[in-house]
Image (cartoon, grey):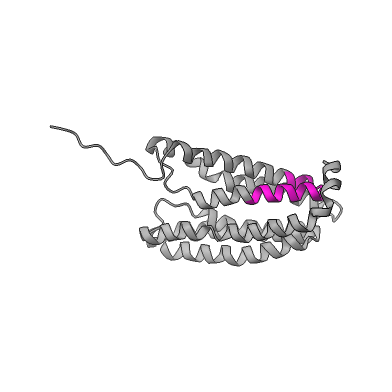
Amino acid sequence: MEAISELLQPYKEHVGFTAGVLTVGQMFSGCFVCNDIRKKGTTDGFSPMPFIGGCGLTILFLQHGMLMGDSVMINSNLVGLAISFSYAAFFAFYTPAKERGSFWRASLWTTLFTFGVLLYAKFENPAVVEDRFGMILTVLMLCLIGQPLIGLPEIIRRKSTEGLPFPMILSGTIVGLSWLLYGVILNNVFVVLQNLAAVTLSGIQLALFAIYPSKPAAPSKKRN
């Protein structure tokens, strides 16, 4: 990877800028999911974790960018953080009153966990914190991106991908590929592993859309 990194060094700024722009653009893909929620009038059938977890993960990616001293990662995650909080607020607004308790509990646990990881980064040995923090981010990213696959049995039963955020998954795949290339240029193993895993999981979810429609089939009428 080091040889490829050296070969691509002249393109570092261009690739980094493109990855940053694509990341910000990918954040706006959540608008399509929010619009589906708005038209439905409720968040029923939609998981809050891409929104709640997105806030926490963006904060941690911002911290990782600061540890690496990479301005591209810092700037893109600052913008992404503002957008993520807007989505979470939108989701909370459309969450039925009886389910808001679950939403706020998930938000509380995400907040506590995020600040716990930030405290770890503050007190960890500076010589190893960047690599270990990158390892933690890799695991968290896999959990967040792979979270929709928990509902795979239900998707197969209903033969529908309704509730899966297709725009976010598709754009996330494209963004993951751009950061994967940027990680190769930086010669940073954790950035490469994070995005290689992200692209793989996103690809699996995209394959589901090729197999099942986005809306469940209407029940057939029985003839007398």
Q: Please state which of residues 216 and 171 is positioned toward the viewer in this rendering.
A: 171
Left or right: where does residue 59 sit relative to residue 213?
right
Q: Please state which of residues 217 and 52 is positioned toward the viewer in this rendering.
A: 217
Which secondary structure dominates the residues rendered in magenta?
A: helix
Left or right: where does residue 54 sit relative to residue 44?
right
Q: Please state which of residues 165 and 213 is positioned toward the viewer in this rendering.
A: 213
Most extreme residue toward the left is: 224
Residue 6 position within the rendered picture, expressed as x and y whole percent measured from the top left: 86, 47
Residue 190 position within the rendered picture, expressed as x and y whole percent measured from the top left: 75, 46
* Residue at 67% across, 62% down: 77
Left or right: where does residue 186 sit relative to residue 54?
right
Question: Is residue 187 inside the magenta stretch?
Answer: yes
* Residue at 55% across, 48% down: 170
- Residue 102 in sight here: yes
Residue 8 position within the rendered picture, expressed as x and y whole percent measured from the top left: 82, 48
* Residue at 64% across, 51% down: 175
- Residue 61 in sight here: no
Of the 4 image quadrants, the one containing the N terminus is top right
- Give the residues in magenta: 175-192
On screen, residue 170 above or below 42: above
Q: Quadrant of residue 224?
A: top left
Question: Is residue 196 inside the magenta stretch?
Answer: no
Question: How many labels, in total?
Answer: 0
Residue 186 position within the rendered picture, expressed as x and y whole percent measured from the top left: 81, 51
Most extreme residue toward the top is: 224
On screen, residue 119 above or below 134: below
* Residue at 51% across, 41% down: 150
